[in-house]
Amino acid sequence: MSEDNHLFRFTVEQGAIADCKPGQFLERWRAGVGEGPISICADRSDDTIELCVHRIGRVTDALFKMKEGDWLGLRGPYGHGFPIAEMEGRNLILVAGGLGIAPIRALLQYILNRREKFGKLLIVYGMRHSQDLLFRHEMKNLYGRDDLQLFLGAEEIDSPEVPPIQIQLGRVTDVLRMAEFDETYSAAICGPPVMYPYVVNELKAKGMLEKNIFLSLERHMKCALAKCGHCFIGGVYACKEGPVFSLSDLRFIPEVVECAGC
């Protein structure tokens, strides 16, 4: 990971946290510090939960100061994740931008752990700088698999990288154009909203239907209970109705459509 991004692994009491689906989120808190939402970034198969934390603000800073054996409060999971049942049997393209790779990683692990249930698999991951690449060793291992295709892109590239890995120069849409897919695919997208209109345009240009394009529209989901109103936009609460929406659903929410550029 990088200096301001860290992968935390927590052991939870049996039954304390229900099964987490890719795309859902948890609320984490430290006594005397505060609480904040965070996406689930791994397919959960035992009594551990993995969270990729970007250090920004006092809540996340408190996590970076934790030591092995310290405790953290977690509640959830909340929201609607990616529609796994609808995706089974279909060809899939997963598109991540920047820190959006965290929830996409959870979906990717879910698929790989049940590989026989899904069709062709493409992964497109773009970032601003090659040094921002997260899960570098995992990405390098993906290049060695013959049951998927991985495309990495960065707007700026430094070398040498450790471990060395193939990264194309360009934005996420530049790399997306390198992937071969058609209307038989479904797409899962997570990243900064500014990239959404461009990614959606590329997908629709290949004939992909709006109902098969799923976007994670995370907001500041402070309470996660549709009470505080921080994530209320276009008549819906992102924490409750989302954070994952199909593009066809967003068509009826003008404010969200404008924000996502869809």
Image (cartoon, rainbow, N blue to C red):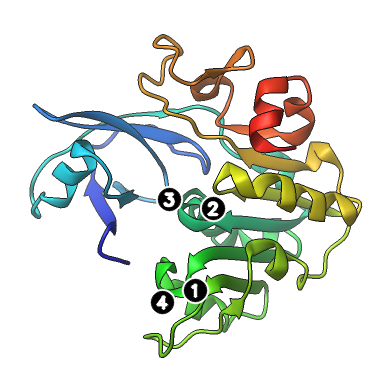
Question: Amino acid under label 1?
Answer: Met
Residue 248 relative to residue 68: left or right: right
Disc 2 to disc 4: CB gap under 8 Å: no
The residue beneath circle 1 is 139
The percent coordinates of residue 221 (x first, y second) are 42, 25
Question: Amino acid under label 2?
Answer: Ile
The disc, 1 or 2, on the residue closer to the chain's N-terminal end is 2
Disc 1 to disc 2: CB gap under 8 Å: no
Residue 183 appears in the figure: no
SS category of the residue bearing label 1: helix
The disc, 3 or 1, on the residue closer to the chain's N-terminal end is 3
Q: What is the quadrant of residue 236 in the picture?
A: top right
Disc 4 to disc 1: CB gap under 8 Å: yes
Taking depth in this image into account, of 251 and 128 the one nearest to the observer is 128
What is the distance, in whole Å, between disc 1 and disc 2 at their CAs?
13 Å
Dot 2 crowding, Cα within 10 Å, few <14, some 14–19, many 20+: many
Residue 94 relative to residue 39: left or right: right
Q: Residue at x 61, y 79 (%)?
A: 168
What is the distance, in whole Å, between disc 3 and disc 4 at their CAs?
16 Å
| Residue 41: mark | 3
SS category of the residue bearing label 3: loop
